[in-house]
Amino acid sequence: MNCLDYRRQLGADPRRETPEMQEHRRGCAGCAAHQARSLGFELALKRSLQVAVPDGLAERILLAQATGERGTRTRRRRRWGWLAAAAVLVAALGVGLQQLQLFAPLARQLVVHLQHEPEALLTHVPLPVAEIERPFAQRGVVLAAPLPAGISYAQPCPVGTMGSVHMVMPEPEGPVTVFFLPTHRERRGDYVDQGMHVRAVPMGTGTLALVAADTRHFDALEAGWRYSLEGTAATAAGAP
Ligand SMILES: [Zn+2]
Ligand SMILES: [Zn+2]
């Protein structure tokens, strides 16, 4: 039974509903509302004088109503169709972007992270040591020796799926961003990503990564950080 059948039969006798009609009405909010209106109308009609109605008028009204509703439903379905397609597209793009972030090479992830945290480069004032030690402690890192001097920014940032301590060391030629990824092992490598130089070095329990516009301080910083994190004498620059 469809809506037109239901309303045609209901129009014939609003007080009589077959089991088939009941079944349709329970599954169709439109016809349920229509039935309620019809019953109300029937009662009102009973109380009023009988008015002559042109032959076939009820049928024509029902047909117009039903086809009108079908049109509306089709349009609505089409709109939902577009919305669903858009939602799928957005979800796919979201997953795509996420994958780009989460599974991109480390250098790309670090450079993207920097771009989303420009405030990290705003200050050149060295932080109190306690404020730098705090994110290391939060990441469960025990320092082997005092930290290098002059760190102006230190936050326990997530980078993709990895935990990091994100720091900035302002140098006269420009800031060097330092990431320590305590639980991520990355092979040693030098990279250039979007114009930024990136060096990754296995260190301590994880990986130290340096990011800067040029590499001039990388060797010295690598040696200094190895001392802080491993407590051993600085290894020769460029050694694996
Ligand atoms: Zn219906
Ligand atoms: Zn950060």
Image (spheres, helix red, strand yellow):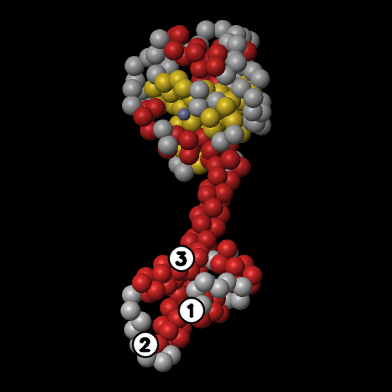
- Rendering coords of residue 189 (x, y %): 61, 33
Q: Residues within 10 Å of mark 1 (few under 14, many from 20)?
A: some
Tell me the quarter of the image containing the C terminus: top right
- Mark closest to the chain's N terminus, 2 or 3: 3
- Mark closest to the chain's N terminus, 3 or 1: 1
Tell me the quarter of the image containing the N terminus: bottom right
Residue in the picture at 50% in, 65% down: 32
Can the viewer see residue 194? yes
Residue type highlighted by circle 2? Val
Q: Which residue is mark 2?
A: 53
- Rendering coords of residue 175 (x, y %): 40, 26
- Mark closest to the chain's N terminus, 2 or 1: 1
- Badge 1 element: helix
- Badge 3 element: helix
Q: Image quadrant of residue 138?
A: top right
Q: Is residue 16 above or below residue 55?
A: above
- Rendering coords of residue 219 (x, y %): 53, 23
Instruction: Tell me whether circle 3 and circle 1 mark residues in contact (CB < 8 Å).
Output: no
| In front of the other: 14 or 211 | 14
Could you tell me how far apart the alpha carbons at marks 2 and 1 are, in whole angstroms?
13 Å
Q: Residues within 10 Å of mark 3 (few under 14, many from 20)?
A: few
Q: Image quadrant of residue 123?
A: top left
| In front of the other: 146 or 50 | 50
Q: Is residue 182 left or right of residue 125?
A: right
Residue type highlighted by circle 1? Gly
Q: Residues within 10 Å of mark 2 (few under 14, many from 20)?
A: few
Could you tell me how far apart the alpha carbons at marks 2 and 3 are, in whole angstroms?
22 Å
Residue type highlighted by circle 3? Ala
Q: Which residue is mark 1?
A: 11
Q: Which residue is mark 3?
A: 36
